[in-house]
Image (cartoon, rainbow, N blue to C red):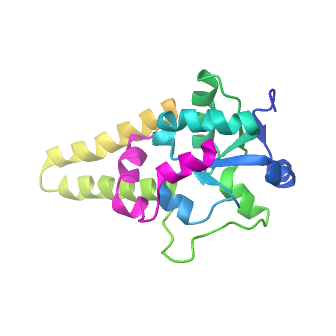
Amino acid sequence: MASTTSLTVDQAHSRLDELTVIDVRTPGEYASGHLPGAHNVPLDDLDRALPALKSAADRGDLLLVCASGARSAQAQERLTRSGLTAAHLTGGTSAWTGAGHDVQRPAEGRAVWAMERQVRLTAGSLVLVGLLAGRRRSAARLLSAGIAGGLVFSALTNTCGMARVLAKLPHNRPAGTDLDATLTALSD
């Protein structure tokens, strides 16, 4: 897979048994449904996981997955800078389920919204609060302006500070998620 930078859903589905799938979403998103056999290594923990990922890459090809393909592409760039070759799934788990393929979910627990949806809700709510509060205190409109500026910056840099903050909330880190166990499994 040395020259392959991405795999389509059909390519990944046909090779799923020979790929080590790394889901870089938050544990909460991962719990809401992931590719069969995928290991959860959140994007924020990628640097910590490098030794285990190198070990897994020595045994076979890595496939990075997220909800849409954006975070897995970021993870791919980071791994490439670290000397690792990995592909990412074009369209992410959204494209995977859209093609009719099954995802695994834990036996219990409630589904968590996708991070993109959480960001839209939070940003929209903060903009509304800023506008409504701005009717009484004009300085409150700065909240809306700050969120708008953050969204523009996010689009230009293809990063999202709000997603990083939201990823740390308890509902995005359900009990039973153990990165150390995942890293051990990848190293073996």
- At x 57% / y 42%, what residue is drawn? 71
Task: Out of 82 and 150, give the one closest to the viewer.
Answer: 82
Main SS, magenta region, reads helix
Q: What percent of the width, then of the height, locates residue 176? A: 45, 64
Q: Residue furthest front?
A: 188
**Percent of width and height locating residue 141:** 23, 46
Q: Position of residue 98 (x, y in %)?
A: 74, 63
- Residue at the extreme bottom of the image, as rendered: 108
* Picture layout, residue 82 above or below residue 21: above
Let me know if residue 188 appears in the view: yes
Q: Is residue 132 magenta?
A: no
Closer to us: 75 or 16? 16
Query: Does residue 15 sit above or below 175 in this rendering?
Result: above
Which quadrant is the C terminus positioned in? top right
Question: How far across and down, in percent of the image, does residue 179 sit?
Answer: 48, 50
Residue 171 highlighted magenta (yes or no): yes
Q: Nearer the viewer, residue 113 or 14?
A: 14
What are the residue bounds of the magenta stretch? 160-188
Q: In terms of depth relative to the viewer, which is nearer, 79 or 141?
A: 79
* Left or right side of 5 for 154: left
For the image, the number of numbered tags is: 0
Can residue 24 be seen at all in this image of the molecule?
no
Asked if residue 111 is positioned above or below residue 56 in the image, the reply reads: below
Residue drawn at 72 percent across, 33 percent down: 58
Which residue is drawn at the image coordinates 73% and 58% (left, top)? 96
User: Toward which corner of the image does residue 131 lie, by quadrant?
Assistant: bottom left
Left/right of residue 152 with respect to residue 9 in the rendered view: left
Tell me: residue 58, above or below residue 147: above
Residue at x-position 25% and y-position 46%: 143
Left or right of 170 on screen, residue 13? right
Quadrant holding the N terminus: top right
